[in-house]
Image (cartoon, rainbow, N blue to C red):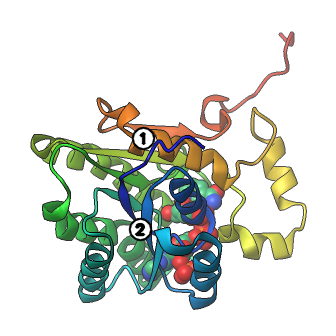
Amino acid sequence: MSNRLSGKVALITGGSSGIGRGIAKRFVAEGAQVAVIGRDERRLRELKNELGENLQTMQGDVTNHEKLKDMIEDAKNNFGFIDTLVCSAGIGYRLPLQKATLEEFDLTISVNVRSIFDLIRIAEKDLKSGNSSILLISSIAGHVTFTDHVIYSAAKAAVTKMTANFAIDLADKCIRVNAISPGFIETPIFDQRLKQDPDFFKKMGSLVPLKRMGVPEDIANAATFLCSDEASYITGVDLVVDGGYVHQGLLPMKKNQN
Ligand SMILES: NC(=O)c1ccc[n+]([C@@H]2O[C@H](COP(=O)([O-])OP(=O)(O)OC[C@H]3O[C@@H](n4cnc5c(N)ncnc54)[C@H](OP(=O)(O)O)[C@@H]3O)[C@@H](O)[C@H]2O)c1
């Protein structure tokens, strides 16, 4: 690693698992100090044991406004300031239309969308003007249409749109706001699906032009670039990291096939 994030202090929601955890590990390896928010005490403890003093863990629910305020204060007190926010906390599952309830709709929007709006509004005044950035984890589900995913897709389309809006609203403070839309990434979000079908990752990987599922490191690579000073003229983008999935069209053809 090359200390590309040296001197930065990042707050990462959903840092206890999957993509957020991969980003936290990479950011520490690149020289950043990192505070992660999650709910699962065991996962947070394991991560702290692994990453040591450059990592602070905070247990809390991102849908709780007061708790979110306290956790941001805690991180600032611990590291002195915050200049990078990564919003990776999210839930998502396949829900056939007639089984999806209004409660599930409200919960998904609350975790995946409302918490981002809340976090940015609370933290924005504390982010250093001129050298700060925000990264939202959206999804290809906000770009293409999957069966039985209306709630999750609506939430992620909102995240992608919010990225552009926040980028413009915070541009006068030179706070950059970008998103990553991952494709299919091997994380615990698919634990239930894997229990039903142990070949799930293999099957999904075969649908991707690059012929594999992504791993959290693939997203951490893109996140490191977007949150580093190398991306200092990039704001408002939603970078799709999906092995080419969204571009293959509905009828993929074999090479040399008419
Ligand atoms: N994996 C994929 O293929 C994929 C594709 C596109 C987009 N994404 C997006 O990537 C993000 C991360 O997902 P993942 O795949 O890494 O899943 P994951 O392993 O299940 O991680 C989800 C994270 O969100 C946290 N979280 C969920 N609800 C929370 C709440 N109310 N308060 C605080 N933390 C909460 C979890 O914390 P605890 O476990 O500690 O509660 C966990 O750290 C999500 O926004 C997801 O929509 C994933």
Q: Nearer the viewer, residue 142 or 138?
A: 138
Residue at image point 15% right, 41% down: 171
* Residue 234 makes an appearance in the image: yes
Q: On screen, 144 above or below 114? A: above
Tell which residue pokes out farthest to the right in this image. Answer: 199
Q: Secondary structure at mark 2?
A: helix
Q: On screen, 252 above or below 127? A: above
Rate crowding at label 1 as few (under 14), some (14 to 19) or many (20 or more) other CA atoms within 10 Å: many
Q: Residue 9: x, y in percent? A: 36, 60
Residue type beneath disc 2: Asn
Q: Residue 13: x, y in percent? A: 43, 70
Q: Is mark 1 within 8 Å of ligand 1?
A: no
Q: Is mark 2 within 8 Å of ligand 1?
A: yes
- Front position among marks 2 and 1: 1
Q: On screen, 253 above or below 4? A: above
Q: Secondary structure at mark 1?
A: helix
Quadrant assignment, res 174: top left
> Cα distance, mark 2 to mark 1?
21 Å
Disc 1 target residue = 226
Residue at image point 32% right, 77% down: 78
Circle on res. 112: 2
Q: Quadrant of ligand 1?
A: bottom right
Residue at image point 22% right, 50% down: 166
Tell which residue pokes out farthest to the left in this image. Answer: 172
Q: Nearer the viewer, residue 156 or 35?
A: 35
Q: Nearer the viewer, residue 53 or 258?
A: 53
Q: Residue 63: x, y in percent? A: 35, 81
